[in-house]
Image: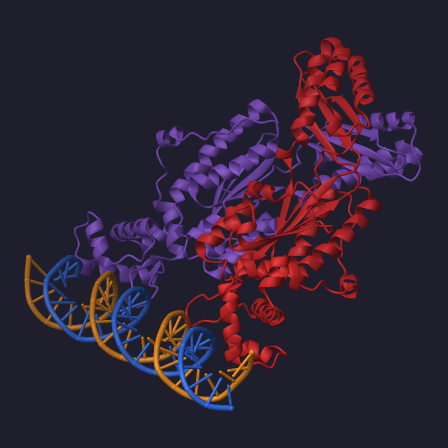
Chain colours: A purple, B red, C orange, D blue
Amino acid sequence: MNKDKIELDERKIKILDAIIRNYLATGEPVGSRTISKFTDLNLSSATIRNEMSDLEELGYILQPHTSAGRIPSDKGYRFYVDHLMQEKDREVAEMKEFVIEKTEKMEAVLKQVAKLLANNTNYATMVTAPSYHHNKIKFIQLSHMDEEQILAVVVLNNNIVKNQVINVEEPLDNETLLKLNILLNSGLNGLSLQEINLATIARLKEQAGIHSSIVGNVMDTLAQALSEEDLQIYTSGATNILKYPELSDSERATNLLAAFEEKEELKSLVSETLSDEETGIQVYIGNETPISTMQDCSVVTATYELGEGVKGTIGIIGPKRMDYENVMDNLKTLKKQLDGIFDKDKT
Amino acid sequence: MNKDKIELDERKIKILDAIIRNYLATGEPVGSRTISKFTDLNLSSATIRNEMSDLEELGYILQPHTSAGRIPSDKGYRFYVDHLMQEKDREVAEMKEFVIEKTEKMEAVLKQVAKLLANNTNYATMVTAPSYHHNKIKFIQLSHMDEEQILAVVVLNNNIVKNQVINVEEPLDNETLLKLNILLNSGLNGLSLQEINLATIARLKEQAGIHSSIVGNVMDTLAQALSEEDLQIYTSGATNILKYPELSDSERATNLLAAFEEKEELKSLVSETLSDEETGIQVYIGNETPISTMQDCSVVTATYELGEGVKGTIGIIGPKRMDYENVMDNLKTLKKQLDGIFDKDKT
DNA sequence: ATTAGCACTCCAAACGATTGAGTGCTAACA
DNA sequence: TGTTAGCACTCAATCGTTTGGAGTGCTAAT
């Protein structure tokens, strides 16, 4: 950071900036003559060449081959994102209207968000449902289904509903079921999923007496249904990556698309923390991303929060020469909107 | 059909068969010399050429260009599927073990089926959940969530659970809720969704008195949650299409992959009827498919049935030169297995 | 009716020449 | 000492040419 300032003088920075902006716009290696005209530095192409030579030596740009122009390296992009990129002025951000229909189901909202973002940016997107760990239990209900099965319904604070069928050996009578219902609700209501520990479970089991196995079953169900394994991921615009030649060669494209189909890998993009920055936006460039098949991509993620520590992640995956300004602007606006939606709607 | 028999003599049929088999195996236009060696007809390439010329005139095969070999036309494939293709002997079919883990959730099973089939065939697959229309209601339960919302849980015969939050203006007391529960259950249990008509609804509303709006709400919920719009489709192996050069050029591939991402279009593959054949297997070749983006593909669908008219569809989408025998064999075996799973497990 | 033989067609791969954008270096200049 | 004009050089991309081979259609002979 300070090293950057020492390494690069004002003029080099200007030139680097011009190279990257040009490359982002055109997608083609940019030469010295272009920069000479493009900037207000009034320098000849020869001078620019010298400077570019330096920049290459320092690792900010590189040449695809000897007689081509320069393209930014990962280090170059990183410098751009950290120091050069201008946040768009607020008015522009405010202007952009995301039309998110209010709907009952959170699932529908998140799908919509993914789609909208994909359409807006022309990159691939993913949205995770918020993790349930900090969510509190509103109520639990066991009901009869038939002789051998009972249905457990768990409702969380933000009206997320989970249900699970539990097999029992011998039939339960209504009274017992009622007792169990009361037991579970008085014991668990208001607790967040994190707060349920072994002691809580042991106590409940003891109170359930001979039906402790059912309590165990319910707890397992809870754990399983709400575990990280179950983390829902909604994606959209995966096919957008075919629009970028540097990603659309057969092998790379197949791997990337497969990652989107088989969402498993995407989970590693869910950032555990809000990251060190105040915005909650994280940029991974090339090798920096945790997913190996995305080495030639950049990934921008944002963490949204629904209060009470209930967090989800939004991610945008595109080529390294993605329009970082636009992407981050989009993410910021969206975050605001999401907060609005969930505040009001409480679904 | 009879026309076919008139149009083609024994020898032409043998040659056509050889051409198609060869093309399916290699994916490259096949020439007269190859056929001359390949068949047991002991004919010179020249003779074959004459026959091929006839076959082309009749529309069963075509030349990509003047000096290339022949490839099957849609008509050729159709003839192959209808008359030439051999069903694999049962023993082989029996051998193939599909390892479907038994799980509680139907959703998980169907996802697995799609994946398994995609892995086995190297084509793209889709599986729809069975339609709910013929499914019967097992029980309905309304519960309090808070002052303004109640939760409706509907359980269907095969343990499919649907839930929906309903907003109410004024709070309901427990007693009323209990009454409504009894009312709904006595009025609707055992009915299939098709059997619920306006008269049923009107009667229920009348009985509900001042709370008729809630009944209406529940019915709307039912209708909405179970409507065709809600038809779930699980896909797998979409990226497999990139393996076939004739489908993987940029534009075609994008369209196809987009169709798989945006599953809407796939709904038109759900065949309304078991089709005229006894097997319930339907083959669409090229133009025959109802989806325009799949003009260069073949689609094979099978309808599986869970008894009581509850039907779902399995589809395989691949290049026209797909391995029809293998695909259909897979589908048949799978159908059997599915029946087994759902019979036992009743999920 | 079948086949050998031959001329012809056309794609695909290989090759080479050309082009043009871009570089690095050197020598002159302010 | 920093800047610039000029020039030779490099290299991917493009295009036309060539060549080889697979395959056809036709004809004449069997």
Q: Residue at x 40, y 48 (%)?
A: A322
Asked which quadrant contains residue B180, the reply is top right
Question: Residue B89, position in %: x, y?
Answer: 76, 65
Question: Residue B258, position in %: x, y?
Answer: 51, 47
Residue A102 in the image: above or below residue A132: above
Would residue B184 be found to the left or right of residue A239 on screen?
A: right
Asked which quadrant contains residue A347, the reply is top right
Number of disc labels: 0
Would residue D4 be found to the left or right of residue B80 on screen?
A: left
The answer to whether residue B288 is visible is yes
Instruction: Choose between B34 and B319: the one closer to the eye.
Output: B34
Residue B35 in the image: above or below residue A167: below
Question: Residue B344, position in %: x, y?
Answer: 84, 46
Instruction: Choose between B330 and A177: the one closer to the eye.
Output: B330
Would residue A51 be found to the left or right of residue B247 on screen?
A: left
The answer to whether residue A160 is visible is no
Would residue B141 be found to the left or right of residue B60 on screen?
A: right
Residue B297 in the image: above or below residue B169: below
Quadrant housing the N terminus of chain B? bottom right
Looking at this rendering, what residue extends furthest in the top direction?
B210
Q: Residue at x 63, y 38 (%)?
A: A131
Quadrant housing the C terminus of chain B? top right
Instruction: Choose between B244 and A307: the one closer to the eye.
Output: B244
Instruction: Choose between A75 and B64: the one closer to the eye.
Output: B64
Question: Residue B286, position in %: x, y?
Answer: 54, 54
